[in-house]
């Protein structure tokens, strides 16, 4: 059984015991997050209608914060002496999916 949920501006395919890096949320480590699924697949049965999906919830436990890879940005223009170096490192929240359940 798996579900598609919208977490942090992206859609993620999740099943029980998956560990995900989602965009940073304000929840503390050890707390629980619930999502409304966009699609549920249960033993080959696809559930995608809004009235049926209202009975499903996806719960996840917040494990803590994580950082993505460092991205280096270099701007350069030839013959003008213009050079700029910047970097970026995205912050994520690690969550573990604990259940996909019907109400």
Image (tube, rainbow, N blue to C red):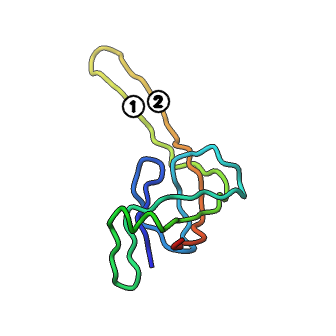
Q: In the depicted view, which residue is nearer to us: 101 or 79?
A: 101
| Pointer 2 residue | 86
- Quadrant where the N terminus lies? bottom left
Q: Where residue 24 appears, x then y in whole percent?
A: 56, 45
Residue 29, placed above or below residue 54? above
Q: Residue at x 35, y 72 (%)?
A: 47
Callout 2 environment at 10 Å: few (<14), some (14 to 19), or many (20+)? few
Residue 3, placed above or below residue 31? below
Q: Is residue 93 left or right of residue 36?
A: right
Q: In the depicted view, which residue is nearer to us: 92 or 59?
A: 59
For the residues bearing labels 2 and 1, Cβ distance under 8 angstroms: yes
| Pointer 1 residue | 74
Callout 1 environment at 10 Å: few (<14), some (14 to 19), or many (20+)? few
Q: CA distance from mark 2 to mark 1?
A: 6 Å
Q: Is residue 98 left or right of residue 90?
A: right
Residue 91 found in image quarter: top right
């Amino acid at each position: 059984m798996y579900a598609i949920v919208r977490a942090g501006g992206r859609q993620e395919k999740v099943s029980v015991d998956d560990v995900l890096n989602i965009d940073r949320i304000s929840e503390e480590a050890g707390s629980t997050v619930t999502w409304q699924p966009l699609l549920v697949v249960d033993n080959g049965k696809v559930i995608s209608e809004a009235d049926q999906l209202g009975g499903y919830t996806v719960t996840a436990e917040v494990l803590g914060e994580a950082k993505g890879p460092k991205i280096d940005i270099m701007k350069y223009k030839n013959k003008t002496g213009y050079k700029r170096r910047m970097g970026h490192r995205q912050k994520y929240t690690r969550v573990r999916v604990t259940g996909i359940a019907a109400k």
